[in-house]
Amino acid sequence: MADGTHVAQGWDSASLKALFNPDTGWLDRRVLSDQGIYQLELERIFARGWNFMCHESQLKEPGEYLVSYIGEDQIIVVRDEDGQVNAMLNTCRHRGNALCRAEQGRAKSFVCSYHGWNYALDGRLIGVPGQSTFYHGDLDRSGLGLRRVRLESYLGFYFATLAEDAPSLHDYLGETGRAGVGMMCAHGEVEVVEGVQKNVIDCNWKIAVDNLFDWYHVPYSHASANSAGFFEIAKIQFPKNQMVMLGEYGHAIGGPGIPKETQDRIDLLSDEEREAMTRAGSPEAPRIRPRKATELMGEAGVRSQGHPNIFPNLWVTISGTQMCLRLPRGPSQTELWWFTLVPKGAQPEAKRQIVRRLNHVFGPAGLLEQDDGENWSQSTRAARGVASRQLGLNMQMGIGHDEVLTNDGGEHYIEGLIGEHGQRWLYRAWTEWMAARDWAELKANHSLPPTGAI
């Protein structure tokens, strides 16, 4: 098993930027194996960015909590008695023990199992055994509460960051990120099904991210699914009708897109007519979105049937019915968390049908995920070889053959054949995040969505 123990030179700004050349599509394989790079990712990407935590439906009642991650920092997200949702580091201020051992639950307060320090749902330290005796009344509890973490929500989806100087979540997402989150609410309010599916794959987290933009691999990696009649590749790939949306800070959406001429005809239809159009179409085809979806996703975004990635690691898939977090667990391991979304208030049998269908696609038991996981693992393993890692990775598909279109809504998108624009945008952003020492430097030096030939 690849263990990522190879550690190369110390990384300065110039050497980090040299790891990827967006003009040629050449990527240094050390980005998938180097321990020093991984540690820097935890500091400069995960600790700095906005990380998805949970959906509001997972914290319905006061005291309900779950534990998520920013990189390798555990975060408690909890709804307090006043209905406020708080985020705090899951580490006791006494000796660092994890307060919450369960992944989710309901509590009146958080009591440390080591020495009994007790914290309120807003993080205040409210009880210390022996405060008046062993501590002689000298302990100032006011400065020893749990560390609060910035938490903001968009459309009911909560994100957290450890960076006090980060922009607001709304600004961070931008047009492309907001379109990606909006995809999940395009058909109305949603809720997350109880139970997050979790599994670990022996791969670097970035290769699991860049694959979501990759529609080139579908007929090859997933040929068995096509042969088994699980789906028909010709009905989902649309290799000549692709749309890639590029946003600030690395957000992107890639995959099939509805041609504008088709969307213009859809725009003339009522919501009832759109539903009838969906029922008359192929079972594999996504539902036609209602009129209000354009407000959430933009005029270009509403045509996307692809996969958004909210940088760094939140994949939205199956037209917004699933989310997947790619959580880093070292250079050569990634923990995947799969969330399934259903219409809010859906009947139990309808929920079961949705869950049954999606479980066969992605997640630990998903047919497609098993194919992908094998590829990611082997690509990561090869990045550790002395000779193999010197070869680099090729992401040159489509360079110089496409045009970035823009509209009045500020969306930047490319339409045409399958290419690797999404992958190149991901690694371009990655180098900029890694080279920047703080948010001020990142804001000043990150790439804006491109225009013109690309």
Image: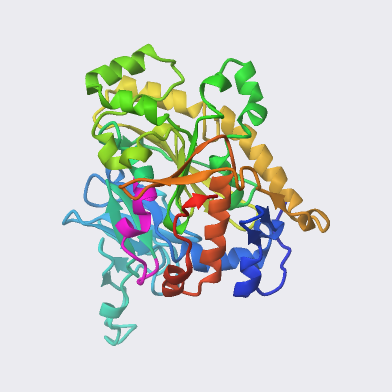
- Between 354 and 99, the residue placed more toward the observer is 354
Give the farthest residue toward the top. 280
State whether residue 30 is above or below residue 217. below
State whether residue 34 is above or below residue 259. below
Q: On the rendered structure, is 381 left or right of 428?
A: right
Residue at 39% from the left image edge and 48% from the top image edge: 176
Residue 39 at x, y percent in the picture: 59, 67
Residue 131 shows up from this direction: no
Residue 235 at x, y percent in the picture: 52, 20
Q: On the rendered structure, is 45 left or right of 189?
A: right
Q: Is residue 68 magenta?
A: no
Residue at 48% from the left image edge and 69% from the top image edge: 445
- Between 414 and 109, the residue placed more toward the observer is 414
- Between 311 and 265, the residue placed more toward the observer is 265
Give the farthest residue toward the left. 82
Residue 350 shows up from this direction: yes
Q: Quadrant of residue 168?
A: bottom left
Q: On the rendered structure, is 136 left or right of 199?
A: left
Q: On the rendered structure, is 448 left or right of 4?
A: left
Give the farthest residue toward the front. 452
Residue at 67% from the left image edge and 38% from the top image edge: 374
**Which portion, as a residue range, is magenta?**
162-178
Q: Is residue 171 magenta?
A: yes
Residue 218 at x, y percent in the picture: 61, 30
Q: Quadrant of residue 89?
A: bottom left
